Image: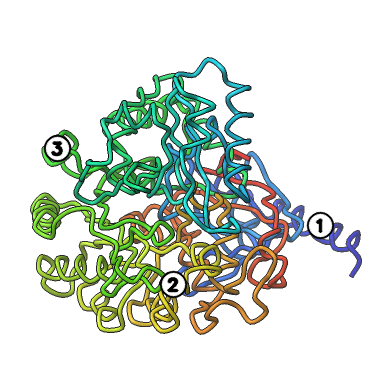
Amino acid sequence: MTKIMHAIALMLLIVVISSCSPDKEKVDLIIHNATIYTVSSGFDIVQAMAVKDGKFVAAGTDSNILSKYEASETLDMGRKTIYPGFIDAHAHFYRYGLGLHVADLLGAESEEELVDRVVTHRGANPEVAWILGRGWDQNLWPEKEFPTKTKLDSLFPNTPVLLTRIDGHAALANQKALEMGGISAKTQILGGKVILKEGKPTGVLIDNAIKMVSDKIPDAGIEESRSALIAAQENCFSVGLTTVADAGLDKKIIDLMSEMHKDNTLKMRIYAMVNPSKENMEHYFKTGPYQDEQMTIKSFKIYGDGALGSRGAALLQPYHDAKTDYGFLLNTQEAFDELAQKMYQNGFQMNTHCIGDSANRTLLNIYAKHLKGKNDLRWRIEHAQVVSIDDMPKFASFSIIPSVQPTHATSDMYWAGQRLGPFRIKTAYAYKDLLDQNGMLALGSDFPVEHINPLNGFHSAVVRKDAKNWPDQGFQPENKITREHALKGMTIWAAYANFEEKLKGSIEAGKLADFVVLEKDIMTAKENELRNVKVSATFIGGKKVF
């Protein structure tokens, strides 16, 4: 049947149905002539759906929906594909927004290029008190060595400079910034390190040492924070995100998000992981967990260790390329245990960043002590990046959710083997192994560490290749997951990990009408096309936001 004949037949069907059904239920929106992945328990695929008051009313066949409902707006999708709104289970939404206004160092291929980009940024922003940048990665450089502050000191002797590594767990500061942070060659700090060369600071700071400098940077003003959130929202809508888990927020920013939700300037739904500061814990332990249709506040974000790229990840055995270096935990085991007790007693999720196998073992054992077996508390290990074979079963035994970021595997695969060696690398980025024993994965991106596009993560999860579709067979292909599992990981499983599965994550009656329309079907598209599939439209509460 030609497209014209199909259209005529459909119009006649609508006319007949309309004339025979005078008592149709009125709704706000009908979507039809689509391929709709509901991600329901049966993973049903339907053609049409109805929306009223911001929620799904029904999903089914074209004839079923068009015969039962009458809408003020009816959209023929021309067989385009629709999915539940994508959920990023681990990101830094607010920080990403702020970072849109600092020097972009992503992809810099040398220390010289890093400096050139900083100079260009300074020329465009001569009035700012601090020169800030983000995204450098020494593993992309020929020598793969950390940069030094030498050139920054000569170019900016009187202006503090702080340039954060791509993972956020290392930074380069110039001498002015080190002086403002009170850092010298004698500085010692728990969970951090000042890198020295010939007994003098190179300017590179690892993990907790960064905070000594970053604490001196003036906080963003309210208008700057608002602008950052709006800019982040616009970019995220363009890639189909409707909910983000923002990992590590203070009450001040959570309150601002709530205000912007109320005045409808912020439409992005937020799962807020709270920073475990004394002030934040005092407030939220007193008020208790909170959830409405726009925000969930039920968890605290804890940092167990650093990152593999900066050798801050805590390992059980030394780094393969640094035989005396084990990395380190960012706090004492006693402090982590005390935090776990507080989370348990006050009814909050504990979501802990764990990269190295030592950090994963330490926190899994602490979780086990407090959770005591199967439960519905949904404590999470964020990243679960290197997990010993002996520790893998603890996720299932204590109902712990692995919250992983598939693009980390395909970003790190070029050098991760150098850090871990040929045997231990097989226990890293083991998403299929985690899924098999746990039955669930929450998928995210960790943006701005990675790109905001969730389809990059979908591609990495199911193909285990980079943007150029390398390597041919995929990186550790035994840990690929299926497309259905990857879609669940960025919809219903992510919602479950957020205690939001009754609100979102699937296209079912009563749930929030958040959905995304794609130009191609990622469930059937060729592997090498997945990262390039475009978003046609993004809807939140049945309203188009992109």
Residue underneath mark 3: 278
**3 or 1: mark nearer the eye:** 3
Q: Which element is circle 2 on?
A: loop
Q: Which element is circle 3 on?
A: helix
**1 or 2: mark nearer the eye:** 2
- Image label count: 3
Q: Which class describes the residues within 10 Å of circle 2: few (<14), some (14-19), or many (20+)?
A: many
| For residue 16, side relative to residue 293 (left or right) | right
- N-terminal of the pair, mark 3 or mark 2, is 3
Q: Position of residue 300 (x, y in %)?
A: 24, 48
Q: Position of residue 226 (x, y in %)?
A: 45, 25
Q: Amino acid at mark 3?
A: Lys
Q: CA distance from mark 3 to mark 2?
A: 33 Å
The residue at the point 10 percent across, 72 percent down is: 372
Q: Amino acid at mark 2?
A: Tyr
Q: Which class describes the residues within 10 Å of circle 1: few (<14), some (14-19), or many (20+)?
A: few
Is 186 situated above or below 18? above
Q: Amino acid at mark 1?
A: Leu
- N-terminal of the pair, mark 1 or mark 2, is 1
- Quadrant for the N terminus, please: bottom right
Residue underneath mark 2: 429
Residue 161 found in image quarter:
top left
